[in-house]
Amino acid sequence: MKVLDGLLCADGFSWWLVESTQGGLRGWTAEGKGSEQWIVPCPDQTMACNKKPAPTPSSPTASTSSPKDKDKDNKCKSDKLAVGIFAQVKQDSLLVIRSEPNTDDVVGRAGPLSVVNIVDGPACVGSAIWFKMKIPALDILGWATENNLYACSKEDSCS
């Protein structure tokens, strides 16, 4: 694949816009997760890359609590967002929307400057603060971290 654009940091991942060298396929992909590398740079563009991604480390046993369980001690607080407000994706960011906090089940993506409505949260999962949001323009409902968002006083004030 050929890298066309990036690096965008969103939802705890490093994203690159790539295109297949055979043509036809183009889209955003995450570089990896933790120490796991999903794409590997090739130093010589004229030759096929023979590097293999690093092996996936064994994952720790999953917690028995639901990802949406909110911190009962009320330690999960956000100084950026709250339920009922509108927020906007930062200009240089891509927001990945998931079915539940901290899962690999992606339900959609919101591009730079997309407006979202915060409908639930916060939930602290995987050392991140997650909010459930609705993206009216894309008809998507799901969870994302607050990292690449900023609050708007009302939908009209989002540029």
Image (spheres, rainbow, N blue to C red):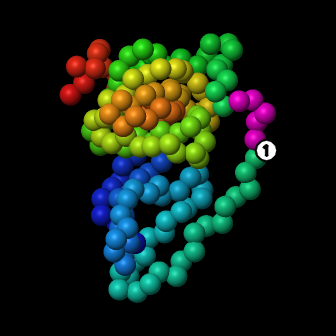
Q: Nearer the viewer, residue 108 or 57?
A: 108
Q: How many marks?
A: 1
Name which residue type carries label 1: Thr
Quadrant hosting residue 37:
bottom right
Of helix, strand and loop, which mostly describes the magenta segment? loop
Residue 27, placed above or below residue 153: below
Quadrant hosting residue 71:
top right
Quadrant hosting residue 128:
top right
Tell me residue 134's x, y (percent): 43, 28
Residue of label 1 = 61
Looking at the rendered image, the quarter that the C terminus falls into is: top left
The span picked out in magenta is 62-66
Q: Is residue 2 visible?
A: no
Q: Is residue 134 left or right of residue 143?
A: left
Q: Determine the residue positioned at 46% across, 16% down.
A: 83
Tell me residue 60's x, y (percent): 76, 47
Looking at the rendered image, the quarter that the N terminus falls into is: bottom left
Residue 12, placed above or below residue 149: below
Q: Is residue 91 magenta?
A: no
Q: Is residue 57 visible?
A: yes
Q: Determine the residue positioned at 39% across, 56% down.
A: 28
Q: Determine the residue positioned at 42% across, 14% down.
A: 84
Give the farthest residue toward the bottom: 47
Describe the element under mark 1 as helix, strand or loop: loop
Q: Is residue 155 left or right of residue 106?
A: left
Tell me residue 69's x, y (percent): 67, 23
Residue 83, placed above or below residue 33: above
> Badge 1 local density, few (<14 within 10 Å), some, or many (20+)?
few
Tell me residue 19's x, y (percent): 35, 68
